[in-house]
Image: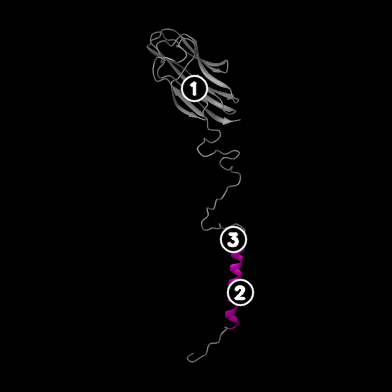
Amino acid sequence: MLGTKRHWPPGPSLSLGLPLALTLLALRAGWAQEGSEPVLLEGECLVVCEPGRAAAGGPGGAALGEAPPGRVAFAAVRSHHHEPAGEIGNGTSGAIYFDQVLVNEGGGFDRTSGSFVAPVRGVYSFRFHVVKVYNRQTVQVSLMLNTWPVVSAFANDPDVTREAATSSVLLPLDPGDRVSLRLRRGNLLGGWKYSSFSGFLIFPL
């Protein structure tokens, strides 16, 4: 109404709103303290860790620049027919060598010896493909676990210019076990270009 005077402080109906607002502010402050909302600090980086996840570089984690635990794989090939001067072996017996390493995750493959050394205990998959060229002899290639021949493959067709001995296998390995390929019959004097040897860790034990 025109000319009506207003009094301050307001009457009881208006003064009830202030305690209610203060109560809501107190509740929000309590929720923030319980960790339901992130707290932002000026000039700081807030890091939230998930329960059960190992910190980088700690037990079960990998340091910056290193492969995570359990990642093991290798692949090697032969890029030319004959061995260059200084390499061990002449394609007549013993270990079969590969001059080009395509993958060596975990560092288990040794190009000098042509063998893979298991870095961790687990089940591994291996595959090999050894080519003989212009060779009428039967060739037998064995995959060796340390000194034990696990599987063998043969190339024995005398009427083809190129043939491959190929096989694959799954093996449980302990750390330090050595896997390699050995020529146990025939020769590779014609060369073994395009041959390959590969393997990877399926899961740790």
Is 13 covered by the magenta stretch?
yes
Residue that mark 2 sits on: 19
- Nearer the observer, 36 or 170: 36
Residue 127, label in figure: 1
Residue that mark 3 sits on: 32
Pointer 2: residues within 10 angstroms few (<14), some, or many (20+)? few
Q: Amino acid at mark 3?
A: Ala
Label 2's element? helix
N-terminal of the two: label 1 or label 3?
3
Is 167 covered by the magenta stretch?
no
Q: Please, what is the dominant secondary structure of the magenta stretch?
A: helix
Residue occupying the point 55% across, 26% down: 124
Residue 63: % across, % down: 54, 39
Establish if 103 lies above or below 42: above
Q: Amino acid at mark 2?
A: Pro
Check the image and name the residue furthest to the front: 86
Residue 9: % across, % down: 57, 83
N-terminal of the two: label 1 or label 2?
2
Count of numbered circles on the image? 3
Model colouring:
one colour
Label 3's element? helix
Apparent side of residue 156 relative to residue 205 in the rendered image (left or right): left
Check the image and name the residue furthest to the bottom: 3
- Nearer the observer, 108 or 158: 108
Residue 152, label in figure: none
Pointer 3: residues within 10 angstroms few (<14), some, or many (20+)? few
Residue occupying the point 45% across, 23% down: 76
Whether label 1 touches label 3, CB < 8 Å: no
Q: Nearer the viewer, mark 3 or mark 2?
A: 3
Q: Which residues are magenta?
A: 11-29
Q: Amino acid at mark 1?
A: Arg
N-terminal of the two: label 3 or label 2?
2
